[in-house]
Image (spheres, rainbow, N blue to C red):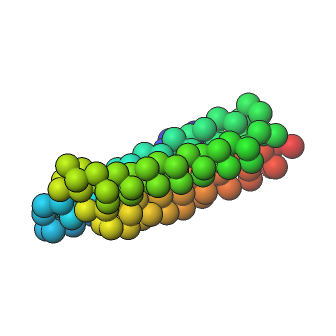
Amino acid sequence: MTQHTTTLLTVGTLAGLAVAAGIAWRLGGAVGTGVLGGYLMGASLSALGVAWQHHLLRTRPERVFSATVGVFVLKLAVLLCAALAFRYVEPAARQVDWRSFLVAFAAGVLLVIALGSMDTLRILKQRRSAA
């Protein structure tokens, strides 16, 4: 990754974190914890997927699609497990609102995927012009 793309992805993700933290602080309690936890979990899993995708684009481009699908399935599994835990496990439900967790998780995923997709397109464009 070049300095520009790393900075764009990092700054965008941190800006999203600042917004999520502000909303979480304003809401407070279990709802605020759900917002912050959901954003952090969604953005983290998406950042892992973007990093893995970029690595495979450089080393084994034929495996990018399977990696993308694998990370998508991982995100769905984590989302399902967390939603069920925060909805039906009473000690967890007292600490984290499951609905705010789900919304913030989706927001974190969308933000990081959008920024990561721009980086991926840039990498593909560089590869095409080098060939």
Q: Residue at x 70, y 36 (%)?
A: 56
Question: Left of 44 or right of it: where is 37?
Answer: left
Q: Nearer the viewer, residue 52 or 128?
A: 52
**123 over 84 or under it: above or below:** above
Question: Left of 96 or right of it: where is 57?
Answer: right
Question: Left of 78 or right of it: where is 32?
Answer: left
Q: Residue at x 72, y 40 (%)?
A: 57
Residue occupying the far top of the picture: 59
Q: Residue at x 39, y 57 (%)?
A: 83
Q: Residue at x 38, y 63 (%)?
A: 102
Horizontal and vertical percent for residue 124? 74, 50
Question: Left of 41 or right of it: where is 58?
Answer: right
- Dividing the picture into quarters, in which one does residue 105 lie? bottom left
Is the N terminus in the top left, top right, bottom left or bottom right quadrant?
A: top right
Q: Total label count? A: 0
Q: Nearer the viewer, residue 97 or 20?
A: 97
Horizontal and vertical percent for residue 48? 51, 41
**64 over 36 or under it: above or below:** above
Is the C terminus in the top left, top right, bottom left or bottom right quadrant?
A: top right
Horizontal and vertical percent for residue 74? 55, 46
Horizontal and vertical percent for residue 85? 34, 51
Q: Is residue 17 visible?
A: no
Q: Is residue 3 visible?
A: yes
- Dividing the picture into quarters, in which one does residue 59 lie? top right
